[in-house]
Amino acid sequence: MTNAQATDTYPGELADVPGWFPPLDQMLFTWFLERQQKQGMSGDLLELGVYMGKSAILLGHHLQGGEKFTVCDLFEGDAPDEANKAESTKSYASLTQQAFERNYLSFHDTLPTVIAAPSSVVSEKVAPDSCRFVHVDASHLYEHVYGDIGAAQDILLPEGIVVLDDFRSEHTPGVSVAAWEAVLNRGLRPVCLSTQKLYGTWGDPEPLQEELLDMLRQRTDVGLSVQEAAGHRLVRARSRGMKPPPFPPSRHYTAPVPASAPAAGVTESRAARPARPAPPGPAGSPRTCCPPWSPGPYGGHARSGPDPGVS
């Protein structure tokens, strides 16, 4: 995330909610969450850093009975340190809890549990081994991301999924260092890399990767490559003109009014027009047809009929 975006209207569709949530990641979120549901996996959902609620709205759509959804963000609160304060002021000055809640409630009947505080408090608010899916999209500063990844590891179920946003963006080197450090030194196993996010688990990634590869290879709107690095299989996906997956509209959605078809006008063809009546001849004599020009007395042409240029 780089530049703040403001919203002061109720969204009609998910695309109307400001935020950085590309179609590829919308599709991957949906696939991972639906796979968990199909396998009978239950567990809570957690998002660190919500901005205007775009990804939270999608996550909330996959909440199952008996599960809890928690979101954590500073909103208008005080940052825990000067570096985080500068980051928030630069990139999220327009973010308010009211804007997030307005957007979320446009698609859902109830709010998730909202923690308006630094992400460092989440371990105190969310029980260990309770979540099946955690999205980390809060501060981009290394120290904060390091702590968020540690919290996610404690909070996730053994086969749960963690998603690290901005792990490869040029303006977020702190996230890159913390993400790959977790892979190399903290037991995180990559499942998939999108253009923007790293999907990982502290469980066994191979069954997930095999199913994911089968799905991705059937799509024509995904570029796919598989590489090996430091003992990890890295599945890389990129969009090829992908459209967002279907998502229910909000309660404020208004279907576009189809444009009225223009009334069918009657176009009279030249061939269908009646012939223009010829000018009358001398009174009492019928008009005879003759060539419009005949030789004149001086070898030229004398007019013998109406001027073709005059009607």
Image: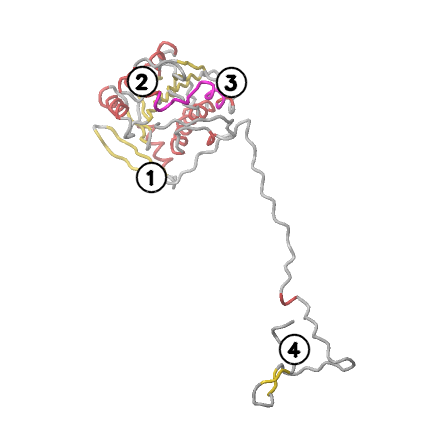
Say which quadrant the N terminus sits in: top left
Where does label 2 land, which residue? 84
Q: Nearer the viewer, residue 213 or 301?
A: 301
Side of 184 relative to 297 (left or right): left
Say which quadrant the C terminus sits in: bottom right
Where does label 3 land, which residue? 110
Where does label 4 land, which residue? 306
Q: Considering only vertical position in the picture, is 217 above or below 150?
A: below
x then y, percent, for residue 164: 32, 24
Q: Quadrant of residue 138?
A: top left
x then y, percent, for residue 20: 39, 29
**Label 1 amino acid?**
Gly
First in sequence: mark 3 vs mark 4? 3
Q: Which residues are magenta?
A: 89-103
**Label 3 amino acid?**
Thr
Side of 181 relative to 289 (left or right): left
| Label 4 vs label 1, nearer the camera | 4
Q: Residue most toward the left?
A: 230
